[in-house]
Structures are given as C-alpha cells and as structure tokens.
Amino acid sequence: DGGITQSPKYLFRKEGQNVTLSCEQNLNHDAMYWYRQDPGQGLRLIYYSQIVNDFQKGDIAEGYSVSREKKESFPLTVTSAQKNPTAFYLCASSIDNTDTQYFGPGTRLTVL
Amino acid sequence: AQRVTQPEKLLSVFKGAPVELKCNYSYSGSPELFWYVQYSRQRLQLLLRHISRESIKGFTADLNKGETSFHLKKPFAQEEDSAMYYCALSRSNYQLIWGAGTKLIIKP
C-alpha cells in the first residue's frame, strides 16, 4: 500500500462545523475522486477531478466542496449544509478517467 | 435508470466449493464492468475488468449482455478469498456506479 493517503483515519466534529478531509497521492495521477460509503450501500461519487484546477460534481455533491490546486492533493470539505455527514469517505485516483482507480484507506467522519 | 445490483449481501461457502457472486446491471449504453475487492484491513482494489478478459486469483467474470449480468466465478474457493466484493459499472463519462457489495466468507 501507499501512494494515496487520507488523513485523519477517524474524525469527530460537532454539528454545524465545517471539516476538511485530506487526500494526497504521489502516483502522478491526473484524476482524483471522492466517494461516500454508508452501511449496506455502494460507493457514491461526491466530486471528481480529471485534471488540476478542474473538478465536477458527482451524484451527491450537495453540502460538500473540493479544490484541486495541486496535482497531488484533492481535499474535501464537508460543510454544515450537509444534512447527514456521518459516513466513511474514500478518496481514489487514476492515471486518467478511463483507468483503474486506486483507493486510499478512508476517513470515518462522525458528527456529534 | 443506471443501476448495479448485487442481490446477496452475504455469501458463505466451504473451502473447495465453487463460488459465484452475482452482479446485474441496468444501463442503456455499452457497459464496461469491474469487480473490486476489499480484503480485511486492506484497501479497496481492482480485481478484474471485463475488457481485459483475464483470470485473476482464479476468478473470472463474463459479461452477459442478454441477461445484463457480470457474475464473478471461481471453481474452487480458498480461505484467502474471504473479502468484500463490489461490482461497478463505468458510465459514458467514465464515472463508476457501484453495487452495494457482497461479503464472501469461505468456511474451512
């Protein structure tokens, strides 16, 4: 493992607070993705970025924001507008948007 | 609607028995399908994709467009196959739609 890292592993926040999840990759991949995983459900795409300084909304972008200022980094901010933020968040990257996705270890966010 | 369905949340088989994890999809275009696997305490990783038509760790999967299925099969299960398996479909914009996953338990 290695190549794509997420931090922290566990995150606790109070309701109403924004929180930023980190995702870094040293694989020189152009494309990066954020997914949300809830129990008993498949992964759902939040945002994706095909290239630096560009990103698009996925299926469930409401209440989230991202930036892609560097090729290596794709942080996700969970805002107070996200109605049900408690979930497991996975970051992935791929050489381009047609290729195999490589996943980070995930961040479990709990909003109290 | 574009959808991937894995009808079994849990599948338990004995070591040495055949395994089949089911995946059905709904998609109007030409599908590209994948199986990803997550072993205990490891990251989610690609197992195989249908365009490669290869066998990985003894697993194969054939795309059946008539039945809109992409079932994952292995003739003789091994204990190390115990894991969570996800089927995924690539849409025309290359974004993946995921099934809910099947937990495979191989009993000794």
Image (cartoon, helix red, strand yellow):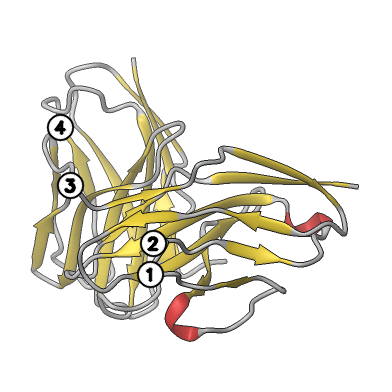
Same chain letter for marks 4 and 3: yes
Query: Do pointers 4 and 1 mark residues of a single chain?
Result: no
Where residue A92 appears, x then y in whole percent? 36, 61
Vertical comparison of A110 with A107: above or below: above
Residue sitting at the far right? B108
- Distance of label 2 from label 1 (alpha carbons): 5 Å
Q: Amino acid at mark 2?
A: Thr
Vertical comparison of A2 with B108: above or below: below
Assign a secondary structure to mark 4. Answer: loop
Spatial separation of the CA atoms under disc 4 and disc 3: 17 Å
Q: At x 45% / y 31%, what residue is drawn?
A: A39
Q: Are marks 2 and 3 on the same chain?
A: no
Nearer mark to the viewer, of 4 and 1: 1
x and y percent of residue A102 in the render? 43, 67
Residue at 15% over, 63% down: A68
Relative placement, left or right, of B53 versus A35 is right
Does dot 2 land on a helix, a strand or a loop?
loop
Disc 1 sits on a residue from what chain? Answer: B
**SS at badge 3:** loop
Q: Which mark is residue B68?
A: 2
Q: Which mark is residue B14?
A: none
Residue at image mark 1: B65
Q: Which residue corresponds to mark 3?
A: A59
Give the alpha-carbon distance from disc 1 to disc 3, as whole Å: 25 Å
The residue carrying mark 4 is A79
As shown in the figure, which amino acid type bears the numbered disc 3? Asp
Q: Tell which subunit mark 4 falls on.
A: A
* Label 4 neighbour load within 10 Å: few <14, some 14-19, many 20+: some
Q: Amino acid at mark 1?
A: Lys
